[in-house]
Amino acid sequence: MTPADLFRRLTGLEDDPRSTQDIWQEMARVPGFVDSRNCGLVDAVQSGWYLNDSDELFRGFPISAADSVLDVGCGAGGATLFCARRGAHVVFVDVAPEKIEALAAHLVDTPARKAEGIVSDGIPLPVESNSMSRVVAMEVLEHVPDPAEFLKELVRVGQPGALYLLAVPDALGERMQQGLAPDYYFQHPNHIHIFEREAFAGLVKDAGLEVVQREYFGFYWTMWVLMYWSLARSAGGTLGGESYDIVQPPFPPLLNDWARLWQQFIQIPEAAPVKRALDQLLPKSQIIIARKPLERSAA
């Protein structure tokens, strides 16, 4: 069963002759409709992501035209594009050639000083040692066979003093999903590691980096995916594919309702401390900003 099949089953439109895309677009034209992805972007900005006014990809992680940025596991390229729009030299890496090709096309009209796309699993990285001033790896470590080896490779390519933006799914949300998600979600090439918070920080330190900042965000997305898996189980059938497939439209109507409710809530100024508390309690992601030491300590 595909996400499109699930959508049709939950909406009772399995026999509708219209394409799934046409049905989805009609739903999206209804007044008050909120796309889950747009709500997620509003939520992310409130959490400190994509801060245009201060040129910070994430709060505490500034980007300038002088930077050389490596984005490993770039996916659709949100981080790469943010950095490219600041004039940085961007190197974007993913295992999927079609993602590299699509992102390269989007980068043509940006003021990026230089843009290089690489198809690679990151072990090893075809990048010169000590060459990058910023290294980004968001929601990648849970996919790789050996996270420690992968991190050491990221450390190798960073300049002394380079900043690292690292994110992995939080363990609590992952364990809650284990009772709902299909088996494939926790098998290669999806999530094959679950990182407890202190274990994640320890992994970063063991790779030779200094932890500068730790953050948590994404209560909205944790609830979204828990609802998604619950709906899928209620509909019967078995979903297949890769983990990122579930955040591609069309979305079940209940998730449209959740997006609308959450977006309305976080637009209330008084909701800010509640959102922060929920992001700490049940986040989608745990984030570490780390720095490569200027000089390695003598053994």
Image: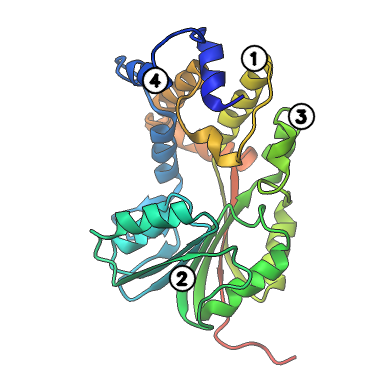
130 sits to left or right of 30: right
Name the N-terminal-most of marks 2 and 3.
2
Q: Which residue is mark 3?
A: 179
Name the N-terminal-most of marks 1 and 2.
2
Amino acid type at image mark 3: Gly
Q: How is the image coloured?
A: rainbow
Between circles 2 and 4, the one closer to the viewer is: 4
Q: Which residue appears at 59% of the width and 79% of the height? A: 156
Q: Which residue is mark 1?
A: 235
Q: Which residue is mark 4?
A: 24
* Direction front: furthest residue: 17
Name the N-terminal-most of marks 3 and 4.
4
Amino acid type at image mark 1: Ala
SS at mark 1 in the image: helix
Q: Which residue is mark 2?
A: 134
Amino acid type at image mark 4: Trp
Label 1, label 2: how many angstroms apart (C-alpha)? 44 Å
Amino acid type at image mark 2: Arg
Name the N-terminal-most of marks 1 and 3.
3
Label 2, label 4: how many angstroms apart (C-alpha)? 39 Å
Between circles 1 and 3, the one closer to the viewer is: 1
Label 1, label 3: how many angstroms apart (C-alpha)? 16 Å
Task: Measuring from the top left, give residue 187's x and y in whole percent.
Answer: 73, 44
Q: Which residue appears at 40% of the width and 18% of the height? A: 19
* Circles 2 and 4: CB atoms closer than 8 Å: no
Between circles 1 and 2, the one closer to the viewer is: 1
SS at mark 3 in the image: loop
